[in-house]
Image (cartoon, rainbow, N blue to C red):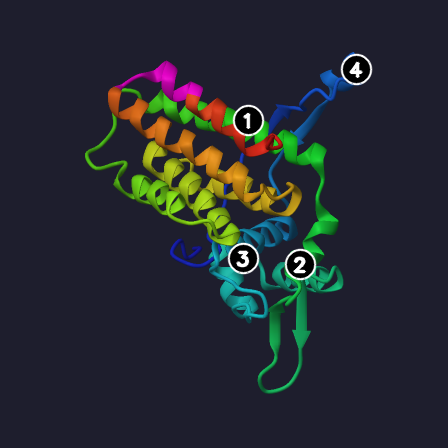
Amino acid sequence: MANTAGKFGPYPAPVLTAPVRSTGTSSSTAAARLPVRQQTGAELIRSRIALRVRLGVLASGERLPDTGVIAEELGMSEMTVRRALETMCQDGLLDRRRGRVGGTFVATNWDAVIEAFRDADQAASLEDFHLLLECGLVARSAGELPPDWASGLQAVVEEMNATVDHAELLRLETCFHLGLAEALGNGMAGEEVADLLGRLCLLATVPDAGRLQEANKHHADLLTALELGRLDAAVGAVKAHCLAATSPTS
């Protein structure tokens, strides 16, 4: 059985689809669909490592856990883990070092290397599905919020208000959405959201500090609307957050 308390965690992802955002080029392009699908084992390892780097659990130059540990935490074979890590080494995302203090390490130039893997179309599809999922969680939670459900989320909002450091804003933005899924999903959506966010760490253009600070205003609006039981305002805050986080600043 996988160790759910580990760095990577299991992921029973469903197979789903989400519409691609219109680029305004043609009706056929606007109607196209990209799959939001269950990841292969190698893709899952890749996205989990990317998410852990974003969260600061793994830092550039840091040694990864042994393959057996990762395999146990993700519930997959060590062979799959080894092959996935080898591919990431070939892509420049990880470094393999030999010797007594060797192992597999996050590349010291992770941020520079990962830019080569950005994909605006795939990112837009994932962002649209994330929006759909969060709106569903908000609707599901209406009138059924447990006591103190928002205390940790409010702390994240306050921390984002108090910092201008870009890396810290990115970390806190990710923490907010992971925490929201846990708070509203009763443990049923956390892994799905972790999967989406990990994939977006790899594929989406990184929001600048201004967009993250603007998006944090909608975090606060969402928490207030949920506390007041205003479902329409809560869904509106989720939508406004998505626009603020993905649209260029003026």
Q: Are marks 2 and 1 in contact (CB under 8 Å)?
A: no
Distance in Å between CA atoms under marks 3 and 4: 37 Å
Distance in Å between CA atoms under marks 2 and 1: 34 Å
Task: Residue at 49%, 23% (x, y): give it.
Answer: 239
Quickly name the residue at label 4.
28
Task: Residue at 71%, 57% (x, y): give it.
Answer: 113
Distance in Å between CA atoms under marks 4 and 1: 24 Å
* Membership of 223 in magenta stretch: no
Q: Is residue 15 visible?
A: no
In the depicted structure, whether residue 171 falls above or below residue 6: above
- The disc, 2 or 1, on the residue closer to the chain's N-terminal end is 2
Count the labels in the image. 4
Image: magenta residue range: 229-236
Q: Crowding at label 3, few (<14), some or many (≥20) Cα neighbours within 10 Å?
A: many
Find residue 247 and report its horizontal and vertical position in percent: 60, 30
Mark carried by residue 53: 3
Distance in Å between CA atoms under marks 4 and 2: 35 Å
Hey, which residue is sitting farthest front in the picture?
250
Q: Are marks 3 and 4 in contact (CB under 8 Å)?
A: no
Quickly name the residue at label 1.
243
Find residue 80 and report its horizontal and vertical position in percent: 64, 58
